[in-house]
Image (cartoon, rainbow, N blue to C red):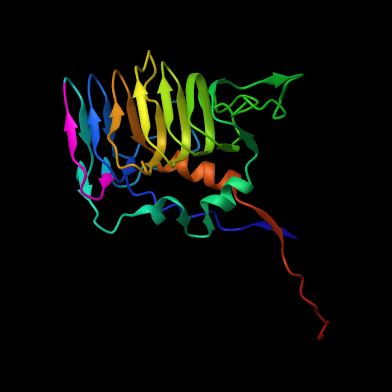
Amino acid sequence: MITRIAPVDFGIHASLTTQGGVSLQGNANVNGADQIPTGWTSCDVPGPPQPGIRDNGGNVTTGGNGNVVGNPPVVNDPTLDNTDFTVFGGATYAEMAARATITLPGGNYSTAPVVTNGACDNTVLTNWGDGLNPGAACGSYFPIIYLSGTTTLNNTQGQGILLVDGDLNIQGSYEFYGVVIIQGDLKTSGGGATEAHFWGGVMAKNADLSVQNLTGKATLNFSSCAILQALQATSAISMMRSRGWTQLF
């Protein structure tokens, strides 16, 4: 018999978790209300709202129509430190990176689902699943993606667990569903016609304690469903111990 080992507990309790300040400009929005991604039909009823931003005392500023929503919108957690971004319940950042389904150097990437002969082609390193179309061939593909340096993503989408050494820059209409752990800064610009850049939870360590810049129509939506599906799909499988038995009657 085989079973899935309990998923890693990343300790995500907000839409965006960070150590530094956050600047929201334009139509940037961070929303801690638990939301179901558009088109996802297998989610449970949404849970209670989470904070929009969890930090350890950095300033959160807004300009234009920038906004933070949640319960509360911003929570200051003085216990938050570097280890929250590298040591999790059940695994470390390094261990998760070693388990990555996809490993790429830092750079500029466009990622989108690839279907070959009717099946999801997970040999393509820029195929990161299909959260926009959960019923399609790549809708159930949730890879662990490890990017070993500062990266820019522009078009189209991905899902699973995204691990980034360095900064992560999101441009245009890019969308990601699941868990995102960034060892540097998060920067977004524009949002195109998409409803959100992120569905799930984002943790940006910003090791230099700089400001997280969210501009344009950039939106981060907390989603326990996107987090749970990514964790369940990427949890390790292990053989269960068998038990000896004897018939008594």
Q: Is residue 206 above or below residue 197?
A: below
Tell me the quarter of the picture where residue 196 sits: top left
Task: Give the residue furthest to the front.
Answer: 208
Q: Position of residue 238 (x, y in %)?
A: 70, 58
Residue at image x 52%, y 42%? 229
Q: Return the x and y of residue 228 as percentages of the image width and height.
A: 48, 45
- Camera-nearest residue between 154 and 193: 154
Q: Is residue 84 magenta?
A: no
Which image quarter is the C terminus in?
A: bottom right
Please state the horizontal and vertical placement of residue 142, each as a whole percent of the image: 59, 37
The N terminus sits in image quarter: bottom right
Q: Position of residue 210 (x, y in %)?
A: 29, 37
How many circles with numbers are drawn on the protein?
A: 0
Q: Is 153 rendered above or below residue 243?
A: above
Q: Which residues are magenta?
A: 54-63
Q: Along the line of sight, which residue is nearer the eye, 113 or 215? A: 215
Work out whether residue 39 can be spotted: no
Q: Residue at x 29, y 39 (%)?
A: 32
Q: Is residue 161 left or right of residue 21?
A: right
Residues 7 and 44: in front is 7
- Tell me if I can see residue 58 in this picture: yes
Horizontal side of residue 69 vs 139, given as left or right:
left
Residue 55 magenta-highlighted: yes
